[in-house]
Image (tube, rainbow, N blue to C red):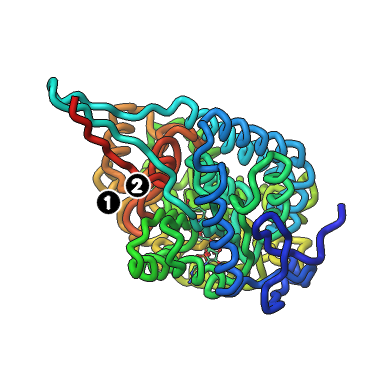
Amino acid sequence: MSIPTELLHHIDGKDVPSVGGETFGVGDPVFGEEYARCAAGQAADIDLAVAAARRAFTDGPWPGLPARERAATLVRIAEAIEARADVLARLESFDTGLPITQAKSQAHRAAENFRYFADVIVAQHEDAFLAGTRQVNYAIRQPAGVAGLITPWNTPFMLETWKLAPSLAAGCAVVLKPAEWSPLSASLLPSIMAEAGVPDGVFNLVHGIGEEAGAALVAHPDVPRLSFTGESATGQIIMRAAAEHLKEVSMELGGKSPCVVFADADLDRALDAAVFGVFSLNGERCTASSRVLVQREVYEEFVAALAARASAVRVGPPSDPATEVGALIHPEHHARVMEYVEIGKREARLVAGGGRPDGLPTGTYLAPTVFADVPPDARIFQEEIFGPVVCVTPFDTEEEAVALANATRYGLAGYVWTGDLARGHRVARAVQAGMVWVNSHNVRDLRTPFGGIKASGVGREGGAHSIDFYSDLRVVHVAV
Ligand code: NAD
């Protein structure tokens, strides 16, 4: 497979460089060696992309298409993605360091996003209210205009489609700004959109650095909706800037999600879930179960089993089908995660990993790492590490488990393992999180609202929530 060495913007149906010719270097995750020059969008490029989107929205057919026709285009997008499944997996694995076997599921998930929102808009109904015999009032959704979509580097293509599918389904025109560490897979989108028959200008792609291209998109007055996924600190910067134009924002931010294991749980299944929750996708997963809280009666047994499982995880080159944990996204991120590992060694008891895996003396690799006896005020308990590193902490009572689960600034996801279903429901309500899984793995149902509370986000994506976000709601009152 040949890897492109030049990545361009896509504006108004054409692949174009930056107006001023600016570029940045994109490195491979393992060694950071530059493999491509990518157009570095500036305010002038964002202006062109937003103007193209605005024209497509005001003068073009897209926002006014009957739902069935727009849905048919979304289904063609899904088919075009699936037709590229192999190349997508290879590009994604090459660019992000994800194990190739895990990158392979991304095309299916991305395609499903489009199929699902195609179904939503066809089945969608509006509300009508009859006020006695005097008036009928009905609410309608109208596409909001140009949506700015800003996405992170973990599972980049899937998360891009997670925003593209509902915004296009709602009838918006879009400008997508992918993460600068992983721009490669987005380069498939222009041909996918063209093949599916999306009119020029409806989908625009501007690459670039967050503080340049991203900030210009956030500041643009003609972009009334901003959907952002990334770090909580970046979300704060974006919300401040968006306030200038009173834009509506959707924020999917960081997490430090607890996995609470009670002594009466099916411990084998809980262990499987804990291993999957923090070591799949290299631990670079917003909903990672990075804090495992275990009831004291089974604590030592669970810690020993988790350490053994972590030590058995196969770390290796992303392209090797035997690899279970690949390379971290970037040497800078690797250095940051390693710093946390060193901090953890001072704060807690290291029971697995803690350094480079055997046989991999160079590259952005880290052996799956488990810290036990982690106190709740430890930095590794409080801060998002975003790598294959897990903290384990004991608790005695249900109240203590809930207090520990809620003892961080984050509130994205939670996982509860118990043989007592009533307790499962109770703890699911008490844990401060947008999403809680009881006795189950993190599997996403696209119809449910996805998002977090506290520092983990503002708003929800998924189902009707997404369509509402990309729409203006209007009520019409008619005398009868
Ligand atoms: P990041 O915040 O560094 O970057 C995300 C995007 O924002 C990138 O495209 C970046 O270029 C852009 N950006 C950066 N500064 C900007 C600015 N000033 N203005 C506008 N745009 C700007 O995040 P990341 O490191 O790419 O991703 C990892 C983070 O994303 C983690 O915290 C993770 O938990 C979070 N995440 C959350 C979810 C969720 O659904 N809640 C999903 C995936 C990832």
* Residue 359 visible (yes or no): yes
- SS for tag 2? loop
* Residue 345 visible (yes or no): no
Q: Is residue 305 left or right of residue 295?
A: right
Front disc: 2 or 1: 2
Q: Is residue 32 left or right of residue 212?
A: right
Q: Residues within 10 Å of mark 2 (few under 14, many from 20)?
A: many
Residue 365 image point, x, y percent: 69, 63
Residue 64 image point, x, y percent: 50, 39
Depth check: give the residue in front, 94 or 376.
94
Amino acid under disc 2:
Ala
Amino acid under disc 1:
Ala
Image: 341 above or below 143: below
Give the labeled residue for mark 1.
403
Q: Residues within 10 Å of mark 1 (few under 14, many from 20)?
A: some
Give the labeled residue for mark 2.
433
